[in-house]
Every structure is written in C-alpha cells, then in structure tokens.
Amino acid sequence: MTAKNLQDTTTLHNGVKMPWFGIGVFKVEEGPELVNAVKTAIKHGYRSVDTAAIYENEEGVGKGIQEGLKEAGISREELFVTSKVWNADLGYESTIAAYETSLKKLGLEYLDLYLIHWPVEGKYKDAWRALETLYKEGRVKAIGVSNFQIHHLEDVMKDAEIKPMVNQVEYHPRLTQKELQAFCKDNGIQLEAWSPLMQGQLLDNEVLQEIANKHNKSVAQIILRWDLQNGVVTIPKSTKEHRIVENANVFNFELTKEEMETIDGLNQNLRVGPDPDHFDF
C-alpha cells in the first residue's frame, strides 16, 4: 500500500500512526528561515516534523510548529513530531533528562517519536531502557532508533521489553540497505530515510533524470516516490517554499516495476554520513 496523499500514515507496531512523508531540518540553523520552513510545510499539508537535539534548532522548530498549527487551523494531535537523544546524553538518567530538555525547547507536552541518534557501543542499551520508561509512562507515543545496523538491532532487542518502532537511517538510491530493510520488515520495525536526496548529490544523475522526464517530474520527486513505493518513510529537508511544495507533490504518479529496479540498481553502498560502525563523535 503506497501513500495516496501527504497525510497518509503507516501504522507502527504499537498502533501509532506515523505520516509517510515529513520535513527534516538537519543543518538548518536557528532563525527566521527555520521557523518559516516548518510553518510553511505545515501550512502546505505536511503533518510530520523531524529534528534532533544536536541540530541545535529545537526552539525554532517549536516556534514554527506553533505558528504552523495556528495558520493551518489544526491541533497539536494532528502533527507528528520527532526528536533524537544525542550521543553525549546516552545513559539512563541522562537520556530522560535530554528528553525533558528537548520538550522544553520545542515547547511541547510530548513527542510522537523519540529516537536514539547513533548506536554508541556500551551506551545505547541504557538509553533504550530510558526510552522504554518514557514510553511506559505515556510521555512519548513511540520510540525508536537511528543509524542502527542489523547487529545493533539484534543486540538491543535481546534485552528489550519493547522493540524499536522505527529505525531512521541514511537511505537513497546509492545506499539502498536492502538487507537492513528486510530485517526491519521481518521484525515490524518501520524504516525511515534521512538524506533521501543524498544531500543533493543525486539531482543531476542521468538515469534518474531520464525517469523524471518520462513522468514530467523532478529527480527529487522520483527519489521520494521510490522511497514511498519501497515502504520507507521519508523526510526531505528544504527551507524554500517552492521546494517544500514540490517535494510533496509525489502522490499523483507511480513508478513502474522496471523503473523501481533501475533505481535500485544505482546502489553503491555509498554514504554521505558517517558509517554507524566506525564513527567517533
């Protein structure tokens, strides 16, 4: 089942509904541009916003959310907000404290999804226990992880009472992560893509351009459509209104099976971000 519109949701394994499509704010600095991007996205029908403590922009995101809700005339409950606990705060008490801090900065009563940002060895299990506590106390609607490989997921699930609902990873046509996706699917964990457009590096790809021309779409729209048809939640980042609107205009066409396979064929296991197994920050 592929999403039919911008408000369409996937149901996480705990019954919580998460929009298939959202706006990301990675590397968008605090300030009017950020506030405006979030507000604009909500105004144009986006119902999911993804941020993280380390982006140092939760206050602006919170402000954009307040203004966007007002302008769109919708309630907080209609929006799905995600943030992430940073590596330095991974520990039982420190993760709970980090959650409080994120809420305060965002100006929200709860988050819809809270993620462990990176699988720091020896630390993510305590952090996961903290997320389980927040979840059991009803303070967050869903919990998950980010950048976890199969062995990290197996490790966390060995001792977990609650398995992750989401795994947000770098995912684009040059990094298709097929094994990880299959593992997540088998375990009822929703895969979500960060940097779906490979930070712009794929926008002049000839193979994608050819498919885009056929559908009278942009390369970005082709990639985002490929995400959705693969059953992957996607959160492209943009601060420009015309791009925010264009990115979301992916519900009125379909890629053929051949086109999907052609795009899969672009995989080179190439990352723009750090390798989760070899990062040190």
Image (cartoon, grey):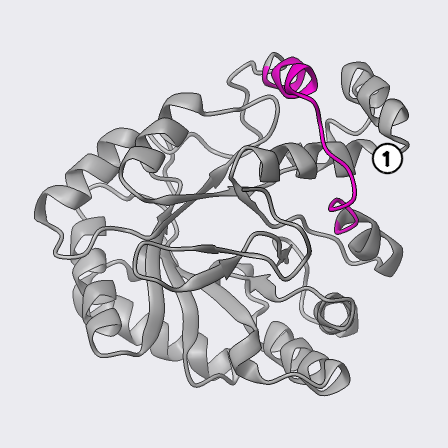
Left or right of 260, for residue 45: right
Q: Nearer the viewer, residue 134 or 72?
A: 72
> Magenta stretch containing residue 254, yes or no?
yes
Q: Residue at x 16, y 38 (%)?
A: 155
In percent of width and height, residue 62 lies at: 59, 78
Q: Residue 230 falls in which quadrant of the image?
A: top right
Residue neighbourhood size for the residue with mark 1, other residues' Cα within 10 Å, grouped as few (<14), some (14–19), many (≥20): some
- Which of the image's four quarters has the C terminus? top left
What is the x, y in percent for residue 196? 62, 38
Whether 107 is drawn above or below 245: the answer is: below
Q: Position of residue 195 (x, y in %)?
A: 60, 40
Comparing 278 with 5, the one in front is 5
Is residue 69 at all visible to an observer of this figure? yes
Q: Residue at x 59, y 30 (%)?
A: 172
Image quadrant in which the N terminus is located: top right
- Taking the spot 56% from the left edge, 73% from the top edge, the residue there is 79
Q: Which residues are magenta?
A: 248-264
Task: Please tell me whether residue 204 is drawn above or below residue 196 in the rendered image.
Answer: above
> Quadrant location of residue 131?
bottom left
Q: At which x and y percent is residue 151?
A: 23, 30
Left or right? Give the position of 29 relative to 280.
right
- Residue marked by disc 1: 217
Q: Nearer the viewer, residue 41 or 125?
A: 41
Q: Which element carries disc 1, helix, strand or loop?
A: loop
* Residue 149 in view (yes/no): no
Q: Amino acid at mark 1?
A: Lys
Q: Nearer the viewer, residue 163 or 93?
A: 163
